[in-house]
Amino acid sequence: MTAQALVQILASGLLMGLIYALIAAGLSLIFGLMDVVNFAHGEFLMLAMYATFGIVAVTALDPILATPLVVGVMFVLGAGAYLLIIRHAMRAKANIGMVQVFATFGLGITIRGLAQHFFTPDYRSIQTSWLSGHTLDLGGVFLPLPQLFGGLLSCVCFAALYVIIRRTDFGRALEATREDAGAVALVGIDRNRVFALGWGLGAALVGIAGAVMAIFYYIHPDVGSPFALIAYVTVALGGFGSIFGALAAGILVGIVEAVSATILAPSMKAIGIYAVYLVVVFVRPRGLFGNL
Amino acid sequence: MSAPFLEVRNVTRRFGGLVANSEVSLTVNKGEILGLIGPNGAGKSTLFNMIAGLYPPNEGRIFFEGKDITAMSAPERCALGIARTFQVVRSFDSMAVIENVIVGSLVRSASAGEARRAARRVLELTGLARRAEAPASELTPPEKRRLEIARALATQPKLLLLDEALTGLTPSEARDGVELVRQIRQDGVTIVMVEHVMEVVMPLVDRAIVLNLGKVLAQGSPKEVVRDEAVIGAYLGERHRAA
Amino acid sequence: MPPDAFARKRRTELGVAAVVAILVALLPIGLHDVYLQNVLILTLMYAALSQSWNILGGYCGQISLGHAIYFGIGAYASTLLYTHLGVTPWIGMLAGGALAAVIALILGYPFFRLRGHYFTIATIVVAETGLIAMINWDYAGGAQGIQIPYGPDSWLHLQFARDKLPYIYFALGFACLTWFVSWLIEDSKWGYWWRAVKDNAEAAESLGVVVFRSKMAAAALSAFFTAIGGSFYAAFVSYIDPDSVMGFQFSLLIALPAVLGGIGTLWGPALGALVLIPLTELTRSYFGGSGTGLDLIIYGLLIMVISLARPEGLTSLVALLGRKLITREPASAGSGASS
């Protein structure tokens, strides 16, 4: 394999990995906040892609410009999911862990059924983006513009996340609620509000990923599942609750996937990721950067 | 001269940069009630947890009936005869009261049936027999405390470690608690109690060891310890610091 | 409950199970519709599978969403032994069960160090890895799968061309076996240890329970019976391929009846299967194939409603109703204790 081919693989993997990191970040945020793994995360991604498709179809906007709208929609969706459904799961007297696993699972399946029902199982795609079909040639290494855009956007998002969590009141409220959900009430922080905002933010992150992916992936009701599993593995690999871990693990997963697809058969590319995951988890049960 | 019942030899424990216990040595005599007291942050719980086997010391050794148990896990120590309660009660909430105790009595029973019979006896002893079939989650806090003790007793320990078992009780509950502890000692169990509430503990224990800032500050009979200058200073200092 | 009352409760449970088993055994006399017979077989099979899952997930509290791997191991082991070496499925299923148990122990070694969600995700990953591996393993048929050659009807080969009755009775026997194992567990050392580990592992250790060993035992037992279910399924459908026996939908379908019926209870998995499987089959027949998604919507809503409204499962609802009917007293809320 030539050096150029290797660089190509790494570059493709890096870009895809940044997008995986974005999907994983939302999951990690929610978990870090309230100890809930959102097993409907794949369906959130799918909805974001459909939302992009829908907005583009209706407004004829370029998907890039539609992204903020998609983010807004997903934010409302995420907050709504918490307020209407997840909040009740937290009230279970026993087995809270199990209740929320299956409650979010049920939500995911329901969303998938609704998508199948209203959008039909037909595959859809967006061809009309300014970015579609264009590629940047960087000294022989080809970077498709949609993926490049996605990777850059992901970096921006992580930087923004860092600022939000460390420097704003909301971020501090998130941290405080994570540390001691009971005590924050005494200080006047409405726990439900923080949780709802947290879910909204997590869904918004997935929304950005979905809006970008809608440009270069086929959109259909089942598109979320494989990415969901990658997201869970990424979060577990990076460490639940660690945003930085999601970034690092996402990039690692993207690169491993790209390398595996080349070395093994493309149908076996997932095994590379799983193998890395299993090894890391054996050595560090809490993931690379996890402390929960 | 036979080996002491429990011996803690020069034990040190660190958590990151914090030294919770520093070169602590003490012995416990068979059949006594020993009080482990000291102001907040003295290192009582850390020492307690190391004796119970929750984590090992960084330096030093612990001997039980002459055997070096420093590297032994909690289940192994339980088999040898060391039992403990937890400061924040940890009942098995998905099970009934008697089933909680059965988990303890299984260590010494050949079958589940035998364990059940033994559990019933322990429940009688600790006054929880009426509540045997109730889900553990439905007990009142003082009842849960007693369940903790009942469960530990079911393992037929030689040494019982009580972690603030008498803290936060009403006067009448505390009286019952003291009675129970005396009864347990009567039945041949050696007891080490970590406590915070001096008034309850001092009349009860045979000996007291005072820890402060991770080190042994004083030991002796309750009367001696209460009059010790260093001890008074440590507690008063704490009160001044808290103010 | 004084000792004799406890013994009586235990005997009553056995009695009820026996009555139910007999009733189900008599059912086929009146049930001639092939489709319904199929539903019955699947319901019994999932009741047994979920009861097996319940050992690790319900009693011991380790939620596995990758149990399809053991199901698949059972299916492939017995099928390969049969098609390549002519070994009867009866031995094949025991071999599959043993293999599954061994693999569960090997996996448990690293996995039981993982807490809560980390463990669950690890089980999902392992099952997916197994699936991909089987798709690429040509000796075992790869993605094409394996077709079990048709022969004359025979109990030895566990093969019946048109007659469903033997399958019904096998599935019933299997369901009874797993129920009985659960019944034994409920008043056994392992049973109490597992539940202690589930509720509070640290407290359990202080009472002499070796947590790691407990989890391993639960995993091995659970895997063993799940694999037997897989072997049965292979004999029943006569054709297996990776997606049909190791897909994630199986892992979900194995766990869900226990969750719906009451996780960690004796009757939960069976009750859950009784509700979930016919519902799944019916919605799939009426709504599914057309891709309208209605089957998924119903399925998803059912899972959400039960897990949110009644996390203790259907058995606690039944117990509540029973109490109301028998005593005519207002039932106290939430005390659906182990029943």
Image: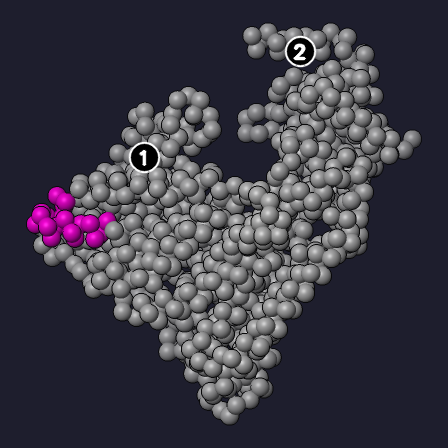
The secondary element bearing badge 2 is classed as helix
Q: Which residue occupies 63% across, 61% down?
A: C182
Mark 2 burial class by Cα count in 10 Å: few <14, some 14-19, many 20+:
some
**Residue A59 is covered by the magenta coloring:** yes
Which quarter of the figure is the N terminus of chain A placed in?
bottom left
Which residue extends farthest right? B1
Q: In the rendered view, does B70 fall on the left or right side of C122?
A: right
Q: Main secondary structure of the magenta part?
A: helix
Tally of marks = 2
Residue labelled with disc 2: B235
Type of amino acid at the residue the image marks with label 1? Leu
> Is residue A45 among the parts visible in the rendering?
yes
Q: Which residue occupies 29% across, 49% down?
A: A44
The secondary element bearing badge 1 is classed as helix
**Residue C37 is covered by the magenta coloring:** no
Residue C59 x, y percent position in the rendering: 60, 53
Type of amino acid at the residue the image marks with label 2? Tyr
Q: How is the image coloured?
A: one colour
Q: In the rendered view, does A69 fall on the left or right side of C294?
A: left
Query: Real-space Cα distance between discs 1 and 2?
Result: 46 Å
Magenta residue span: A48-66
* Nearer to us in this view, B105 or C259: C259
Residue C24 x, y percent position in the rendering: 57, 73
Residue C261 x, y percent position in the rendering: 52, 57
Among the 4 quarters of the image, the one containing residue A261: bottom left
Mark 1 burial class by Cα count in 10 Å: few <14, some 14-19, many 20+:
many
Q: Can you tell which mark lies on residue A197?
A: 1
Q: Which residue occupies 31% across, 33% down?
A: A162
